[in-house]
Image (cartoon, rainbow, N blue to C red):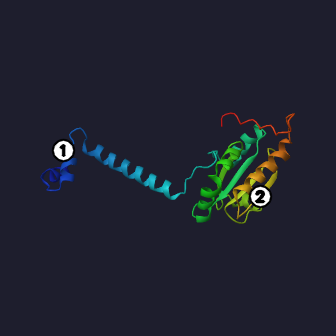
Amino acid sequence: MKFFAAARTSANPALACVAELPLIRSHDRRTLGRMAVLLLSGLFCIGLAGCTAGPKWDPRPYQEAHYRARERSAITLVYFRSWYSVACTRFEERVLADAEVRAEADRLVCVQLDYDAYLPFAEQWGVDLVPAIVLIGPSGELLARLEPPISPEALLDAIHRVRDKVYGTESSPSGLKLPLPRLPGT
């Protein structure tokens, strides 16, 4: 309360405005201040994290996401990244944000894994560099691994090859490939 009494007599107009808020008690003002700091720091961190438009990432841990993919006989796209890597941010901006890549990846179960936190998986699948993409079949087998440099065309080609291998190539009478159905709930 001493702060607000001093604020009323202060020549600083900002402090005087805060003190004149009759509906907000002092503990509420502190709570609002903390909330503002958290909100601003969260927005700052999002800006630093290189969040770009990309595939719809499954927020669950890899094991749960792959279990979901296995239930639906879907392919799992695993993206190994390092949160402090500029190369990963550029890959997200140039490759994963590509409209064609997003459209194809959205038909898969997509999971982001931090390379350092999931090192045993990276070693199991032979990933040595980030950014890296691993395509895993419904039964858990490694179907494709891509390491830098990865272009949008190379990623699309790998997705198409893996999809043809897993699902086979169905053709319509005109010889065009039929689109695969989207996963329910995606």
Q: Which mark is residue 58?
A: none
Q: Position of residue 91 (x, y in %)?
A: 63, 59
In this rendering, does residue 85 appear at all? no
Q: Is residue 70 left or right of residue 82?
A: right
- Residue sticking out furthest to the left: 9
**Vertical arrangement, residue 29 with respect to residue 132, above or below:** above
Amino acid marked by disc 2: Arg
Q: Is residue 119 above or below residue 24?
A: below
Per the model, the C-alpha gap separating discs 2 and 1 is: 62 Å
Q: Secondary structure at mark 1?
A: loop
x and y percent of residue 93 in the render?
A: 59, 57
- Which quarter of the picture shows residue 139? top right
Identify the image quadrant of residue 60: top right
Residue for badge 2: 145
Q: Nearer the viewer, mark 2 or mark 1?
A: 2
What amino acid type should be assigned to the residue bearing mark 1? Answer: Glu
For label 2, the crowd category at 10 Å Cα-Cα, with few meaning under 14, some 14 to 19 and many 20 or more, is some
Which residue lies at the image location 70% right of the left edge and 56% below the top edge?
A: 152
Residue 172 rendering spot, x and y as whole percentages: 85, 35
Residue ID at (80%, 37%) = 178
Look at mark 1 in the image and give the residue it sits on. 20
Element marked by disc 2: strand
Q: Is residue 20 left or right of residue 185?
A: left
Classify 10 Å Cα crowding around label 1: few (below 14), some (14-19), many (20 and above): few
